[in-house]
Image: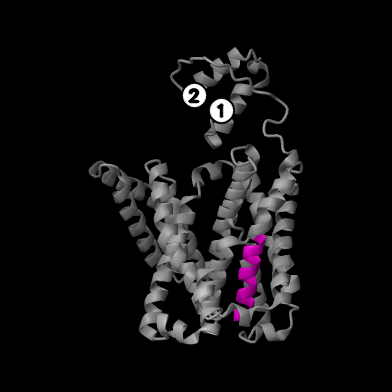
Amino acid sequence: MVGIILGPTILGSFFPKIYNFIFPQNLVQVAMLDTLGWFGLFLVLLSTGIEVDFSSIWKQRKNALVISTLDIIVPIIFSMAFIYFLPSRYFEFSDNKFITSFFISIIMTISALPIAIRALREVGIMKSDLGFLIISALTINDIIGWIIFTLLLSLFSMKFFDWEIAIKITLYTGVFTFLALNVGKKVVNWLFSKVVNQDSDGVQGILAVLISTGVVFGLITLEIGIHTLFGFFIAGIVAGDSPIFTKSARNTVHNFVYSIFASLFFVNIGLKINFFESFNLFLALFITFVGITGRYLGAWIGSTLSKNIKYRNIISIAHTPGGEMHIVVSLIALSFGLLNKELFVAIVFAAILSSIINGPWLAVASKRFNYLESFEVLVYPGIKLEAQCKEQVISKLLDLLKLEYREVNILENVLDREDIVCSGL
């Protein structure tokens, strides 16, 4: 909003002299602001990657992978079926209407993980099995979506298509991702342990290692031929998976990124484009409808195939927001000349509107959701438990509740659940 108010949309339209005085259209000035904006974007992707709990998600991969895979395939097909038949004037910037439609459809598949997390937390589902399944599916969707997007961006930016180069880029990307999530994870964890021992609270050293890892991974992906952003995203996943990376460190990184650098990135978008001139109501509503419907259908079909039929409506709604990720990927596409300003503004509008309606929609859908399903947990005041491990604690609680857990494998099921994610339930 600040970018739109101070940019060409409002200040530039009504007070052009003041606008040009504050933001002189000088190449050096513009480049300086763009540099800060891009650095902010790199850190946004780094912070997004940190929120991905890869180890826990891998334990839940079966159902989550089915939902997230369908939530990519279905929106691409659905979006293509509509976007390809838009009037040709929306594709004036592209020689190939099919390729551009496909690229826009890829943007439509990525769901906003931070928006979904906030909405699930607000309606009280976040810590449940259903909440964890949704977060796992959305995270896998993020990873696959970013891999596809960055690969396609690299291929489309080539002056001519070469199958040999395309296969090499795909292969190198796969190798890099595998090595980063395995070898890179151990190296980063070792570096974290070294800086924590030398620093009183460890946060400064962790922050230095984190950003350095992002820069190194970004340079590697740039050398491979895919966008630097993917390197920062993977660096965030690798760092966030470390047990040394504490909640305090996460909060510090999040505050550091979103209080300054992320804000500069989003402000810079508003400073670049006249949203009034480029706003097309039909196109904005069309993109909103296609995006929300495609992502909902994808998650709905995925939930059905993974046999999560009871709560498939909640799962599907959680996949609908576009959020900041849509704005990020569409801005990159705009900078590469793959979108025109009208389509970019329409995608930004759709991202904001889908995020606004997600919370209330999820709140209505989740009213029938019963957190503890068919059993009740009784909490007795004044209980003191002495135990050496989690299993002993849970066994003693079951004894206190007089549950015949040995007959129905309650203990085994509870420990399996705690192994996936430690919830304290």
The answer to whether residue 354 of the structure is visible from this angle is: yes
Task: In this rendered view, identify the residue nearer to me: 100 or 371.
Answer: 371
The residues colored magenta run: 341-354
Secondary structure mostly taken by the magenta-highlighted segment of the chain: helix
Q: Amino acid at mark 1?
A: Leu
Residue on which disc 1 sits: 415
The answer to whether residue 42 of the structure is visible from this angle is: no
Residue 210, quarter of the rendered image: bottom left
Q: Quadrant of the C terminus?
A: top right
Residue 314 lies, in percent from the top left, at 71, 47
Q: Amino acid at mark 2?
A: Lys
Tell me which residue sits at (59%, 57%) in the image.
112
Position above or below: 381 against 267: above
Question: Is 299 left, or right, of 171 in this rendering?
Answer: right
Residue 417 lies, in percent from the top left, at 58, 32
Task: In this rendered view, identify the residue nearer to me: 102 or 321.
Answer: 321
Q: Residues within 10 Å of mark 2 (few under 14, many from 20)?
A: few
Identify the disc placed on residue 390.
Answer: 2
Sequence-earlier tag: 2 or 1: 2
Tell me which residue sits at (39%, 50%) in the image.
252
Residue 75 lies, in percent from the top left, at 70, 63
Check disc 1 and report its element: helix, strand or loop: helix
Q: Are marks 2 and 1 in contact (CB under 8 Å)?
A: yes
Position above or below: 86 against 117: below
